[in-house]
Amino acid sequence: MFQVRTDLALEAREKFDEDNVEIKGVRLEEEQATPDIHISSVIIETENGAKAMGKPKGSYVTLEAPNMIDEDEGYHREISIQLSKVLKRLLPQKEDFTTLVVGLGNRAVTPDSLGPRVVDNLCITRHIIKEFGRYVIGDSCHKSVSSIVPGVMAQTGIESMEIVRGITKETNPDIIIAVDALAARSTRRLNRTIQITDTGINPGSGVGNHRHALNGESMGIPVIAVGIPTVVDAATIVIDTMNNLLEAMSQAEQLRRISNSYEKLDMMEKYELVHELLTPQLNTLFVTPKDVDEAVKRLSFTVSEGINLALQKNEEAHRY
């Protein structure tokens, strides 16, 4: 059966709402953090809920900011602050802890370069603290932070999980923050959504490239995953277009029967129909916005700023 590809737990849950199916063991909590930033938390509490959702048990927090693609520096600063608040709830609740930030993805492929670009903008302090002591860095970068960009298997011949696990054994961090580009089901969430989860991540799963997971079980320490959807399945775009077309057709008396027949299908049936109609060359196609270069560059600063804020002692010490 054709599966809708999405890395966002919020979208996976919305599919059940569209089919009028209630999922036991899955809670949804929502809050309006600011007038332009909406936060949704999907909490999977049971194994049955995890099986239904197709995702591990844990918390999945989604920040939706419709104007995140704009070049409003103040707005991006606000997103970074909200991101840091979510991260702080998931980070160890002790004064001093060490963090390894992993930038997943391929730097040479723009939609997949979010992780490496975020690492480029981080405040890395582990080497300074080991050499000179914590007092040298002051409040601006208080925690011990190290980072790695493991690349992709096509470049290294090694699973990212194997590289990160080896580094974890040598450097012994208290927690890992993994940053990666994601795949979305909805075009309106492209470059406008940040997902934070305490369940780790399966690199490449959103586009069908299943690699070994980076999670607490494989790493031996907690793993927080941060991601932004930068690509969407081509079938999603076709369905969005068909929905808009049939909505217009429903206004015409002669074409209303066609529209009504299509509307009787549930979302999975619609995806299967589109999957069969697309040629073999197109049904594995993923699409990204034409301005993805600028978007990823801008969003990498936003995410790195949120991580920097979450890992420093004084939130106001770090500025753009």
Image: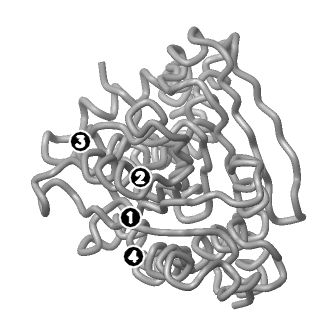
CB under 8 Å between callouts 4 and 2?
A: no
Alpha carbon of mark 3 to alpha carbon of mark 1: how far? 15 Å
CB under 8 Å between callouts 4 and 3?
A: no
Q: Which residue is mark 4?
A: 290
Sequence-wise, the earlier of marks 4 and 2 is 2
**Residue 288, which numbered label?**
1
Sequence-wise, the earlier of marks 4 and 3 is 3
Q: Residue at x 81, y 75 (%)?
A: 315
Query: Is any atom of residue 320 visible in this view?
Result: yes
CB under 8 Å between callouts 2 and 1?
A: yes
Given the image, on which type of amino acid does mark 2 rest? Val
Given the image, on which type of amino acid does mark 1 rest? Thr
Alpha carbon of mark 4 to alpha carbon of mark 3: how far? 20 Å
Sequence-wise, the earlier of marks 3 and 2 is 2
Q: Residue 176: give x, y in percent of width and height.
A: 51, 52
Q: Residue 214: give x, y in percent of width and height.
A: 40, 42
Q: Residue 309: give x, y in percent of width and height.
A: 72, 72
Alpha carbon of mark 3 to alpha carbon of mark 2: how far? 12 Å
Is residue 248 toward the left or the right of residue 96 in the image? left
Q: Residue at x 50, y 14 (%)?
A: 51
Query: Is any atom of residue 234 visible in this view?
Result: no
Q: Residue at x 66, y 88 (%)?
A: 136
Q: As displayed, is residue 68 above or below residue 294?
A: above
- For marks 3 and 1, give the one nearer the viewer: 1
Where the C terminus falls, by quadrant?
bottom right
Quarter-wise, where is residue 95 in the image?
bottom right
The front one of 148 and 151 is: 148
Sequence-wise, the earlier of marks 2 and 1 is 2
